[in-house]
Image (spheres, rainbow, N blue to C red):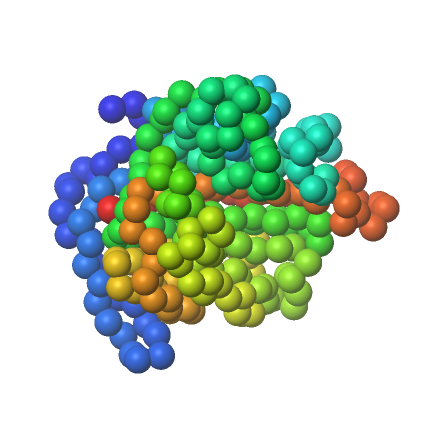
Amino acid sequence: MPAGARPPARPGPVTERVTGRAGTRTVTAVAAFLDDFDGPDLDEAVWVPHYLPAWSSRAASRATFEVARSRLVLRIPPGQGLWCPDTHPEPLRVSGVQSGTWSGPVGSRRGQQAFRPGLVVQEAQPRVAGWLPSRGRVAVTCRMELSPRSMAALWLSGFEEDPDDAGELCVVEVFGRSVRDGTAEVGVGVKRLGDPRLEQQFVQPRLAIDVAELHEYAVVWDEATAVFTVDGTEVHRASRPPTYPMQVMVAVFDFPGWSVGDDDHLVPVLEVERIAGSG
């Protein structure tokens, strides 16, 4: 297996103590995946360094990133162009990696996470299924450097080979404009989006954490319940989450339309120490 992403050296049960409103409980899952970014490069057998490339192209959607000092660092420098400038409803720049992708042929409407009706594929994408968990646990240890016009997130999105498999599990979503006084609104939960079978169960609790420091954000889920945690403490619980194959999405975003006029030089950063999970 290429350096970087690999199963743990000793696959087997992983036990985690989760503290929530009902007290402390133990969750056990089978270890299946670990990327601690110790390799010299991104493992592109697992991670596609392009954000939803079917709607633009791989060249136009390529992330600005580096793997260094055992971390994946995603950033958006001032010169990086807009993503889907002719079709996205507002100006957006993004650097992201995702653990799967596919599309139909050019001109078709078969693709992932369509953001408006009538989108057509601009560049056909091969099927890549680097890691597609469907239940178990996914955790990311990361830090963020955000301004009021930027956002960073890790979420699981349905692979969508069945068009209804289009819901999301949001593990962490932080908008820079919510960060103040050592706290931040941390978005977590189930997003219904294109899956009519799901119930929207997304929340943004304000937590006393400094997102510029490393924290672990995680979800443990099965067909009955999804439990979202920050540093091992439960912050949200959702019922009947999606349990179809889901790709892991990791990205930092910049919204130029939110500029206040003197911030074009700012560089949002999402720095990932490790991503681990089962399922």
Q: Nearer the viewer, residue 110 or 32?
A: 110
Quadrant for the N terminus in the image = top left
State the residue at coordinates (42%, 55%): 196
Is residue 116 placed above or below 179 in the rendered structure?
above
Q: Is residue 233 visible?
A: no
Q: Is residue 207 left or right of residue 84?
A: left
Q: Which residue lies most toward the right here?
A: 261
Q: Is residue 84 visible?
A: yes
Q: Quadrant of residue 75?
A: top right
State the residue at coordinates (20%, 54%): 29
State the residue at coordinates (37%, 66%): 238
Q: Which residue lies most toward the bottom here?
A: 22
Where residue 143 appears, x then y in whole percent? 52, 49
Q: Is residue 259 left or right of residue 196?
A: right
Where residue 159 appears, x then y in whole percent? 38, 39
Where residue 273 appears, x then y in whole percent? 42, 43
Q: Nearer the viewer, residue 208 or 229?
A: 229
Q: Nearer the viewer, residue 78 or 51?
A: 51
